[in-house]
Amino acid sequence: QEDMMEKDNSLTNKAYETIQQQIFDFDLFPGQIVSDYLLSKELNMSRTPIRQALMRLKNEGLLEEQIGKKNYRVSTITKEDIQDLFDFREGIETTAFMLSWRNGITPEQLENLQEITDKMKETKDAGQAKEHFFYDQQFHNELVALSNNKRLIKAHDEILLQLTRMRFLSFLENSLQSKACMKHQAIIDAIKDQDYERGRQAVIDHVRSSRDDYINLFGNGLSANSLCLLRYFTRSPETDSKEDE
């Protein structure tokens, strides 16, 4: 019986990870209906682990139930959604910065933040959008982790999936990648200069600037052409080669 439960959990996790990645890659785009029947055929597994995975994704906010229907759909992203999310993010990251400063940011921790930002710049210049995105996210994870506040870190983790989906929108506008590098460097420079207020304002400015950029990109919904571009930029070379076979 334990072996059966372990197998079921493994299938559920596999379904969860696959569907989540499809959402991030915009293979399943905002507002699209998600059918457990079709997914069971696609993933070659029973509908039970699919349904469990869909419930988990719904609880994380990536899917939403359709009123009066059994199917889910991929959560849409509206101007109000972006505003709410970034208001929450501003509270988390400014509080994390305050606690990190109070704890004392060590030279080693500062060097780590600088190395991440340098890698962001390198991947941007090399046109490696996915890698740039990874380091962008890592910077914010590290900044919040410096607070050593478990509840704050958990709150940041809870919105991370929504932030991940939105950060992929930067693929549509290359200038956003350059801006992110500049904003991160401004935070680091303030820490180096031991200027707390300038650093706190740099965090706020970065979050609010990102909010406005995403509202401009997505506030009125993505066009069909934009969705196609997102699929192109987020699809891995391995996926393309398999589809060409």
Image (cartoon, helix red, strand yellow):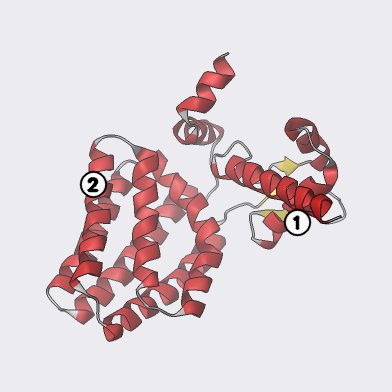
Amino acid found under the numbered disc labelled 1: Met
Residue 24 in picture, x, y percent from top left? 55, 44
* Residue 121 numbered mark, or none: 2
Dot 2 crowding, Cα within 10 Å, few <14, some 14–19, many 20+: many
The quarter of the picture where residue 169 lies is top left
Label pair 1/2, CB-CB below 8 angstroms: no
Query: Badge 1 is on which residue?
Result: 55
Tell me what residue is drawn at x 58 percent, y 43 percent.
21
Q: Quadrant of the N terminus?
A: bottom right
Residue 95 as seen in the image, left or right of residue 7: left
Position of residue 144 relative to residue 237, above or below, is: below
Residue 156 in picture, x, y percent from top left? 49, 69
Q: Quadrant of the C terminus?
A: top right
Residue 47 as seen in the image, left or right of residue 173: right
The quarter of the picture where residue 93 lies is bottom left
Q: CA distance from mark 1 to mark 2?
A: 38 Å
Amino acid found under the numbered disc labelled 2: Lys
- For residue 51, say whether it is visible: no
